[in-house]
Image: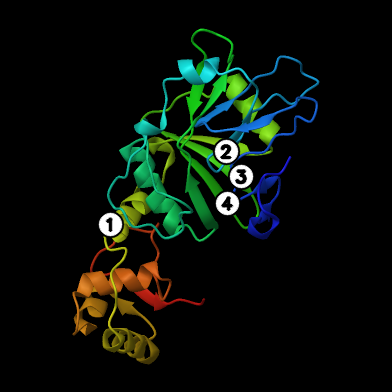
Amino acid sequence: MDFAPASNRRRCGTVDANNFVLYMFMYEHNLQPHETNTLTDYGTDPAVIPILFLVGDMVMTTSSARAKRAHTNSRDDYRPIFPHVTLKCLGQPLFRSQQARDYACMLDLDREVTSWKCLAMAIVNDSDAVRPRYWPLDFFVETESEAFLVTVEPKPKPTPTWVLKVAERTGNRLKNLSLRDLDPVFLKNAKDLMRYAGSEVPLGDRVRVLAALEEYGTLTLAEGLSVIRESKPMHSIAALILSGTLDVDLSEALLGPDSVLRRSDK
C-alpha cells in the first residue's frame, strides 16, 4: 500500500521520508485513504499490525471516524514559533510548544541529523472508546543511520506502554524528551545562533574571515567579529556558522568572546 509517487520516494529503513511519516501494513484490512491529522491504533487482534499512519496529509483508515471526532489534540494546537527560519525542516514548521521549538534549534545544528519534519498529529489508542487515549507527536527525525519519532514535554513524563508498542510496530523508535534531557549549553547556543538564520554574508566579509583563518588557523569570536566590515558582525559570523563554513564547539561552553572559530572541514 504505497500512495507515494515513485519519483518522490526516498527510503530510510521502513520510512518513505518525503511522503510517509509512519508505515504500517494492513493488507488484511481493506483500508482506504482518508484525510485526518490523527494516527490511530485500531486493532485488537495481536496477529494483525493495527496501526493507522499519516502519508503527508493522507491517512489510511477504516470507516470508523469516532476517534477523529473525539480526538482533542488537533492541528490547531500547532503553530509557527520564532525563530521562523529553519535549516533542515521538511514541510511547514509548526510547533506544539516553545520547548518543541527550542529542540528544533538543536536538530538544525546537530551534525548527525539530515532532516526533520514537524508532526501536527497524535497517536491514538482505543479508537472506539468515547474518550480515546492519545499521545501527541512533535517530530519525525532522520539521521544517516536511523529515523525516529520525538515528543518534547516541559517536564519528564512517563511513556505509556501502548504508545511504545505503536511506535515499535511502525518500525520507528520513539524519544520522549523533556528539557531536562537536553544539553543546556548546546540548547542555549543553538537558540542564540538560530535567531540569525536567514542572514546573508557579503562576499567581501566572507573572504576576510576565511583569509584570516588561512593565516592564523583559528580566530576567537571577538576577533572574527572585528574582521567584518560590510555587514552586521554577529549576523555574518552566525550565518557562516549556520551554513557550515565556520566550525565552533557548541557543547563546550556558552558562546562568548573567547569561543574558538575554525574553518569547517566540510
Which of label 3 and label 4 is nearer to you? 3
Q: Which residue is mark 2?
A: 58
Check disc 1 and report the residue beneath it.
192
Which element is circle 1 on? helix
Seen from the viewer's position, the closer of residues 256 and 165 is: 165
Q: Distance between the Cα atoms at labels 4 and 2?
A: 20 Å
| Cα–Cα gap, marks 1 and 2 | 36 Å
**From what the image shows, is residue 229 above or below residue 47?**
below
| Mark sitting earlier along the chain (3/4) | 3
Dot 3 corresponds to which residue? Answer: 20
Give the residue at x 47% y 15%.
70
Label 2 to label 3, Cα distance in Å?
Answer: 9 Å
**CB under 8 Å between callouts 1 and 4?**
no
Pointer 2 or 3: first along the chain: 3
Q: Position of residue 3 (x, y in %)?
A: 67, 44
Cβ atoms under marks 3 and 4 closer than 8 Å: no
Q: Is residue 184 left or right of residue 116?
A: left
Which badge, 1 or 4, comes first in the chain's sequence?
4
Q: Is residue 160 above or below residue 223?
A: above
- The residue identified by callout 4 is 142
How far from the left and from the top, in percent, is residue 64?
60, 17
Q: Secondary structure under badge 3?
A: loop
Q: Nearer the viewer, mark 4 or mark 2?
A: 2
- Give amino acid for label 4: Glu
Q: Is residue 84 above or below residue 209?
A: above
CB-based contact (under 8 Å), mark 1 and mark 3: no
Is 164 in front, or is 209?
Answer: 164
